[in-house]
Amino acid sequence: MNILAEEKPKYLKLADGKDYEIPALNLTTLANVEKTMGFGLGQLQDKMVTETATTLRLVIYALLKETNPKLDLEETGKLVTFDVMKSVSEVLSKVLSIAV
């Protein structure tokens, strides 16, 4: 593994059929995500247990906001349907693994 290799962005195809870029996960991205969410990544798992849908939508929004600044929280929630949950959950798994 090359520790100097740059993380590549990922793409999610959401309910409108468009591919949305999820930024490369680096310290700056994660700090921005925390700022958008209003709580630290260390609290993410607890929030997922107590407020699952609200937290899930917020995390997805915080990630998408980095490269899609025109999206808002409500619109993000509407774009994440059960049909696209598998691809969304794969990206979130990676974020959660960093948060633990």
Image (tube, rainbow, N blue to C red):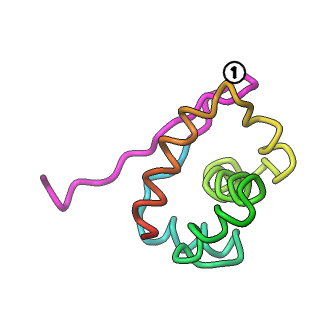
Residue for point 47% across, 50% down: 93
What amino acid is labelled 1 in the image?
Gly
Disc 1 element: loop
- Res 87 quadrant in image: top right
Seen in the image, is 100 located left or right of residue 60? Answer: left
The reply, left or right, for residue 100 in relation to residue 71 is left
Q: Position of residue 84 (x, y in %)?
A: 64, 29
Q: Quadrant of residue 6?
A: bottom left
Q: Position of residue 35 (x, y in %)?
A: 66, 75
Looking at the rendered structure, the number of numbered marks drawn on it comes to 1
- Horizontal relation, residue 97 to residue 1: left or right: right
Farthest residue, direction left: 1
Residue pictured at 51% horizontal, 68% vertical: 30
Residue ID at (14%, 55%): 2
Say above or below: 43 vs 70: below
- Identity of the residue drawn at 51% across and 65% down: 29
Q: Nearer the viewer, residue 17 or 58?
A: 58
Say which quadrant the C terminus sits in: bottom left
List x then y, in percent, for residue 81. Answer: 74, 31
In the image, 40 versus 7, the foreground residue is: 40
| Vertical comparison of 34 with 69: above or below | below
| Residue 18 vs residue 95, the one in the foreground | 95
Q: Position of residue 54 (x, y in %)?
A: 78, 57
Residue holding disc 1? 17
